[in-house]
Amino acid sequence: MAKIWYDKDVDLKLIKSKKVAVLGYGSQGHAQAQNLRQSGVKVVVSELPGTDNYKKAVKDGFKPMPAAKAAEWANVIQILLPDEIQAKVYEKDVAPNLTPGKALLFSHGFNIRFKLIKPPKGVDVILIAPKAPGHTVRRLFADGKGVPMLLAVEQNASKKAWELGLSYAKAVGGTRAGVIRTTFTEETETDLFGEQAVLCGGLCALIQAGFETLIKAGYQPEAAYFECCHEIKLITDMINEGGLAWMRYSISDTAEYGDYTRGQKVVGKSSRDAMQKILKDIQSGAFAKEWVAEARSGKKKFLKMRKAEANSRIEKVGANLRKMMSWLKDAKK
Ligand code: NDP
Ligand code: MG
C-alpha cells in the first residue's frame, strides 16, 4: 500500500509564508482559491474580464487581476486554466515573471508531460491533482472534509518542493482525506487513459451501443433508456461504495450470472486490444499532438462532434424521461 499523508503529518506554515496566484476561476480555480483563503493563505485570482467566472470571482470577494500581474506578485503560481490554452498564457504572462525561487503548480500534468510548457531550472514544478471535480473540492472543504489528492514534484529547485506541495495540499483540504505520491507522467497517462477508455469514452460508447441495440430490435426507446443509461448511476453508486463485490451482492443472482458469463463477450479481446492502442497513443504523445492541433485550429471538428452528440436520439429520449424525475430537476438548480 502506498504511503498516505494526512493533516497531522503536514504544516500549513510553509504555504502561509507564500503569496499564491490562482490563474483561472473555473471548476478547480474557484474551489482551490476559496479553500486557500479559508486556510489563511494570501491568494489572488486571475480571470478574463467580462466572463461569468470573472463575475463569480468578484461575488466571492476576490479582485481578479490579469494573469501577468498575478504571476508577478506571487511566488507560488497555480495554473488552473483549460489544459489546451495553458501554454499560450504561460508564454505570454507567466514565463516573463517566473523568476528563480518561485514555484509553478498544476492540477493535471498534461503540459509538463508533453513538454508544451518548459519551465526554467530555478523554479519548483509541482502537481497537486484533486481526485474530484472542483465543485466537490469546495463543498467538502466548506463542510470540514476534503477529497484525496495526488502529489508529484518534477523540479525541486528549492529543495523544499515536496514540503511546499504538501503544505498547499493541506490548505486546499487534500490531507484531510489523504495525499498519495505520484509522478507527472503517471498522473497524466493514467488520467487520459481513464477518461478515454473507461469513464467517458468507453462508458458513453457502451451506453449508446446498448441503447441502439434494443431500439433496433424493436423495443421502446424509453425502456432502452432506463435499462442502458438511467440505471448506471444506481450500479456505479454501489461500486463506488463497496467495490464490484458489493454491487454484485446487491443485484439478483440472475443479474450476477449474466454479468459473469456475458460481460467478457462485450469487452473481449478486440476491446482490450483497442485499450492497448489508446494507451500507446497517450504514451507516445500522439493523442496530445492531435488534441493540441485541434485546439489551435479552432476546435472545428471537436465542436461539430459536440453538436452531433448533443442532438442524438438518446439525448432527446433522456431529456423527456428526466422530466418525470422531479429530484433530478432539483439537483440541476
Ligand atoms: P475550467 O475550464 O473550469 O476553468 C478555467 C477557467 O480559466 C475558465 O473560467 C476560463 O474562462 C479561464 N480562463 C481562460 N483563459 C484565461 C486567461 N487568459 N486568464 C485568466 N483566466 C482564463 O477548467 P478546470 O478547472 O476544469 O481545469 C483547470 C485545470 O485543473 C486543468 O489542468 C484540469 O485538467 C485540472 N483538473 C480539473 C478537474 C475538474 O474538476 N474540472 C479535476 C482535476 C484536475 P472561460 O470559461 O471564460 O474560458
Ligand atoms: Mg481525471
Image (cartoon, helix red, strand yellow):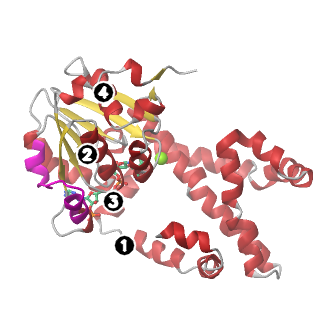
Q: Quickly name the residue at label 2.
A: 79
Distance from mark 4 CB to nearest ligand 1 atom below 8 Å: no
Dot 3, how many residues are within 10 Å of its Cα: few (below 14), some (14-19), or many (20+)?
Answer: few
Does the magenta-highlighted stretch encompass residue 143?
A: no
Q: Quickly name the residue at label 1.
A: 300
Q: Nearer the viewer, mark 2 or mark 1?
A: 2
Q: Can the viewer see residue 283?
A: no
Of labels 4 and 2, earlier in sequence is 2
At label 1, the amino acid type is: Lys
Looking at the rendering, which quadrant does residue 312 occupy?
bottom right
Give me the disc on residue 167: 4
Q: Would residue 235 appear left or right of 257 to someone viewing this image?
A: left
Secondary structure of the residue carrying tag 3 is helix
Q: Would residue 328 appear left or right of 185 to someone viewing this image?
A: right
Residue 208 in the image, given as x and y percentages of width and height: 66, 69
Q: Are marks 4 and 2 in contact (CB under 8 Å)?
A: no
Q: Would residue 210 appear left or right of 28 to someone viewing this image?
A: right
Report the Cα–Cα distance between label 2 and label 3.
21 Å
In this orientation, which residue lies closer to the viewer: 93 or 300? 93
At label 3, the amino acid type is: Ala
Q: Can the viewer see residue 293?
A: yes
Q: Nearer the viewer, mark 2 or mark 3?
A: 2
Residue lying at 58% horizontally and 52% vertically, measured from the top left: 199
Write the start and end of the magenta stretch as one range. Answer: 54-71
Distance from mark 2 CB to nearest ligand 1 atom below 8 Å: yes
- Quarter of the image with the N terminus is top right
Q: Above or below — where is 197 with respect to 11? A: below
Looking at the rendering, which quadrant does residue 323 occupy?
bottom right
